[in-house]
């Protein structure tokens, strides 16, 4: 497993560079690496015992491979595979496949990192590759969006790096388990960097615009897996250090509500999905022990939804309400909405029930309310009119949508005990209440939240406020 781990980290980076030198083989090399990564994730889950690999003992540089890593690596491979299939006939250049492959490798490395400095390196590589992917079409608008993402990400990582140095100063090690022996400002700075990087709570307000303006493939990667790179270290630390769990859980609950609230007032379909991603990251954080399963369920469904929304004749929900979409598009949109709302038969049901069963009473009640909010949010898609239309999908689009729907169905095996009478009734009640609330109160609502919080200067200002709140909370 150790040799396979080293290969899993180095091969994508090596092949990514080779792809650029061999453009005719770009798609095939990227696909081959993704299949290897997929097999690696499956192998970890087949042998879920914890494995530690010390790289530099004196500095605490180490790797940790367990079932949590396995779920995130598997999600990374499946989301990337869906993007490669979707892009197969789109004449993407070798540059695109290079960045996708390097991104996959750096994400895998982040998901097995067990120290703050190697995680920092991986997160910075992720930032650069995502910037290049966002700016890939080379339009003025997308170059600015990419630079905005890069500037916010790098600023967050500066806070994070100072926190990592403080951890080393206190422990003479960068290992995650040194966090609780570090000064409060170290915890606050590291958390701020990860919250901003992952697009969590108000620090995630960079996400709606970035996802909305990016190419569909990039939106799938961002929402399906990249933003989880900031969540993973938080839940890893929460599992290692019980003292951290309450803070992570509080941010998880707040994030679940914030994303739903922000998305309720959006009329752009891609912005709705991006706001939903913020909320779903909260679900991953609120129960760290099962966060990997929820991350996998979310990655699959969000890839499906972004691919379908990318094929719609308009992103404007007002226009879509006036002009019926093709039933061929509405069906996968409906299935994805059911899954993420926690409907039985789809993977989202098991993931939600498993998460809720991990929670004590008050967090459980709050997350049930957040689940109703998710159902309200996705009712925006469920109740869109549909019928005959000239809209058609390419063979590769149909293939990737079909495979993702199959994955949502098969994913039920992750938690079959969820199918109790109580859970089934509760899931159906949540969806019925959510859809009813949408139809009665939100269907005709046109009010929109001012987007002043998404401006670059305000996003940077929010970082300062968040670090103050974190420092105050940790001191208490």
Image: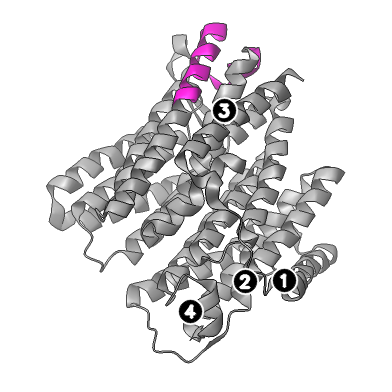
Return the disc, 2 or 3, that comes first in the chain's sequence.
2
Q: Nearer the viewer, mark 1 or mark 4?
A: 1
Q: Nearer the viewer, mark 2 or mark 3?
A: 3
Return the disc, 1 or 4, that comes first in the chain's sequence.
4
* Helix, strand or loop status at disc 2: helix
Which residue is the site of mark 4?
A: 329
Return the disc, 2 or 4, that comes first in the chain's sequence.
4
Q: Position of residue 422 (x, y in %)?
A: 85, 64
- Label 1 Cα neighbours within 10 Å, binned few <14 / some 14-19 / many ≥20: many
Which residue is the site of mark 1?
A: 438
Q: Nearer the viewer, mark 2 or mark 4?
A: 2
228 relative position to 390: left or right: right
Mark 1 near mark 2, Cβ–Cβ under 8 Å? Answer: yes
Q: Position of residue 205 (x, y in %)?
A: 54, 46
The residue sitting at 50% across, 53% down in the picture is 208
Mark 1 and mark 2: Cα distance apart in space: 8 Å
1 relative position to 471: left or right: left
* Helix, strand or loop status at disc 3: helix
Asked if residue 188 is positioned above or below residue 198 in the image, the reply reads above
- Quarter of the rendering occupied by the C terminus: top right
Q: Position of residue 186 (x, y in %)?
A: 58, 17
Which residue is the site of mark 2?
A: 380
Return the disc, 3 or 4, that comes first in the chain's sequence.
4
164 drawn magenta: yes
Span colored in magenta: 158-181
Which residue is the site of mark 3?
A: 464
Mark 2 and mark 4: Cα distance apart in space: 15 Å
* Helix, strand or loop status at disc 1: helix
């Amino acid at each position: 497993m150790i040799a396979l781990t080293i290969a899993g980290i180095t091969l994508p980076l090596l092949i990514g560079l080779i792809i650029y030198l061999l453009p005719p083989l770009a798609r095939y090399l990227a696909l081959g690496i993704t299949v290897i990564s997929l097999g690696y994730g499956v192998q970890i889950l087949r042998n879920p015992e914890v494995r530690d690999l010390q790289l530099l003992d004196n500095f605490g540089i180490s790797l940790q491979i367990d079932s949590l890593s396995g779920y995130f690596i598997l999600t990374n491979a499946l989301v990337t595979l869906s993007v490669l299939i979707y892009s197969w006939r789109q004449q993407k250049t070798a540059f695109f496949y290079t960045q996708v492959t390097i991104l996959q490798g750096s994400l895998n490395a982040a998901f097995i990192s067990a120290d703050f400095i190697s995680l920092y390196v991986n997160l910075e590589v992720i930032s650069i590759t995502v910037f290049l992917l966002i700016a890939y079409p080379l339009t003025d608008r997308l170059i600015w969006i990419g630079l905005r993402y890069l500037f916010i990400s790098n600023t967050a990582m500066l806070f994070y790096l100072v926190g990592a140095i403080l951890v080393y100063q206190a422990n003479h090690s960068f290992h995650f388990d040194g966090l609780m022996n570090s000064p409060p400002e170290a915890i606050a700075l590291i958390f701020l960097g990860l919250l901003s990087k992952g697009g969590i709570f108000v620090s995630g307000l960079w996400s709606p615009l970035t996802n909305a303006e990016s190419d569909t493939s990039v939106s799938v990667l961002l929402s399906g897996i990249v933003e989880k790179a900031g969540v993973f270290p938080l839940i890893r630390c929460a599992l290692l250090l019980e003292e951290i769990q309450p803070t992570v859980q509080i941010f998880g609950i707040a994030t679940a509500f914030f994303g739903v609230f922000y998305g309720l007032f959006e009329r752009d379909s891609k912005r709705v999905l991006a706001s939903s991603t913020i909320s779903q990251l909260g679900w991953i954080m609120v129960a760290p022990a099962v966060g990997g399963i929820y991350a996998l369920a979310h990655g699959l469904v969000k890839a499906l939804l972004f691919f379908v929304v990318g094929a719609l004749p308009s992103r404007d929900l007002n226009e879509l309400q006036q002009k019926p979409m093709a039933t061929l598009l509405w069906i996968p949109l409906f299935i994805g909405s059911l899954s993420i709302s926690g409907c039985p038969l789809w993977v989202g049901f098991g993931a939600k029930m498993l998460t809720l069963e991990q929670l004590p009473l008050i967090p459980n009640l709050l997350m049930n309310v957040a689940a109703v909010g998710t159902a309200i949010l996705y009712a925006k898609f469920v109740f869109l009119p549909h019928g005959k239309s000239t809209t058609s999908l390419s063979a590769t689009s149909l293939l990737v949508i079909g495979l993702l729907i199959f994955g949502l169905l098969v994913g039920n095996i992750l938690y079959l005990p969820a199918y109790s009478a109580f859970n089934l009734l509760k899931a159906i009640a949540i969806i019925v209440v959510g859809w009813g609330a949408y139809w009665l109160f939100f269907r005709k609502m046109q009010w929109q939240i001012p987007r002043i919080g998404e401006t670059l200067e305000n996003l940077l200002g929010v970082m300062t406020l968040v670090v103050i709140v974190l420092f105050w909370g940790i001191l208490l």
